[in-house]
Amino acid sequence: MKKNFSLLAASALLALAVGCNSGQTAVKTETRTYEDSTKYASLKIEVELPVVAKGAAGEIRKGVISCLDDQLTRITTYENEKMFPSFDGNADDTDALFGYYTSQAFSVLSKISQEDAEERERYVNEDEEMSEEQKADILANVPAWEYDYSFKKIDESDRYVVFYSQNYIYQGGAHGGITGAGAMTFDKKDGHMVETFFDSSSTSEMQPVLIKGLIQYYKDMDIEMSQEDLLSSLHIENGIIPLPVWQPYPTKDGLLFTYQQYEIASYAEGMPSFVLPFAEVAPYLTPDAKAVLGL
């Protein structure tokens, strides 16, 4: 496998959120899994969807399906253009819904990876400087693409429920990468998703807590850093640490922040993640986030 410690670390951090559910009025879910492969591609998908219901649970299901659609219809691409159309059948039919997205995603992944392998083969065969033995060795080891997609419920309280969207994709390069939508926190009263936990205007005021969190992240990796060392090593502009693109999400200890690969640090440094206590972030939260978190 080509996964590095970043994926394992990200998975381990998800465990921090588990255990907060009081057991009251839990959002019921159902899980579907899929796995298939060709010579040049492998696809694995695991999705946990809220069961069909009315009211808030039904709205949460719609939000989860919308994210699922957004992620899988753009498989193998970072562009806005979809690789296949959205499902237009009965969204209450989970098996039909899941079957459509998995079959379409596998078809696209198979096609694109096959085209990539054929292009590599043409490139190798046209190289006049390589020996036939060298060509045969390279062609016998053409890398297969890999796409692992996971969408799961990771935490729940009486007020909110959190789903997490993450995928690992390898396209035959030096290494794979982790992408996805990250965490989505839904209000259990009406089913709406908290779009933004912090207003962007709070970024400057939040520098001390962001610095504290990042220093702790490196400390947990046995790397001691001063504030000066941290700011000089990060890939940031004007010495200002941005808020992560992925929204943070609540755990029993506070809000968990995660920066994606390359967002503020090198690939080798993984996905910087840390938890900030609610008391430290409360002054900067949006009214919606405060209401959903009960702060």
Image (spheres, helix red, strand yellow):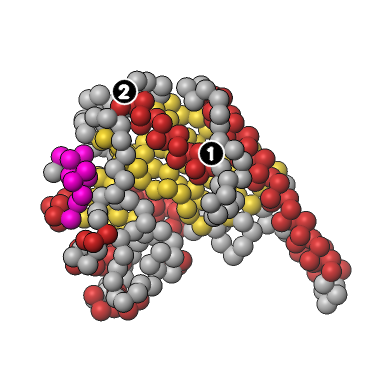
**Amino acid at circle 1:** Ile
Residue at 31% across, 46% down:
195
* Relative to 264, residue 48 above or below: above
Question: Disc 2 or disc 1, which is closer to the eye?
Answer: 2
Mark 1 lies on a secondary structure that is: strand
Q: Main secondary structure of the magenta part?
A: helix
- How far separated are the C-alphas under marks 2 and 1? 28 Å
Give x and y (percent) for residue 269: 41, 66
Q: Which residue is mark 2?
A: 55
Viewed as shown, does residue 101 lie left or right of 192? right
Q: Is residue 110 magenta?
A: no
Give x and y (percent) for residue 224: 27, 72
> Residue 28, located in which quarter of the rendered image?
top left
Magenta region: 284-294
* Relative to 95, residue 260 above or below: below
Viewed as shown, does residue 67 lie left or right of 33? left
Q: Residues within 10 Å of mark 2 (few under 14, many from 20)?
A: few
Give x and y (percent) for residue 124: 80, 66
Q: Residues within 10 Å of mark 1 (few under 14, many from 20)?
A: many
**Amino acid at circle 2:** Gly
Q: Which residue is mark 1?
A: 45
203, 225: nearer the viewer:
203
Residue at 76% across, 60% down:
119
Give x and y (percent) for residue 104: 63, 37
Q: Is residue 229 visible?
A: yes
Q: Quadrant of the C terminus?
A: top left
Q: Is residue 286 magenta?
A: yes
Residue at 39% across, 68% down:
265
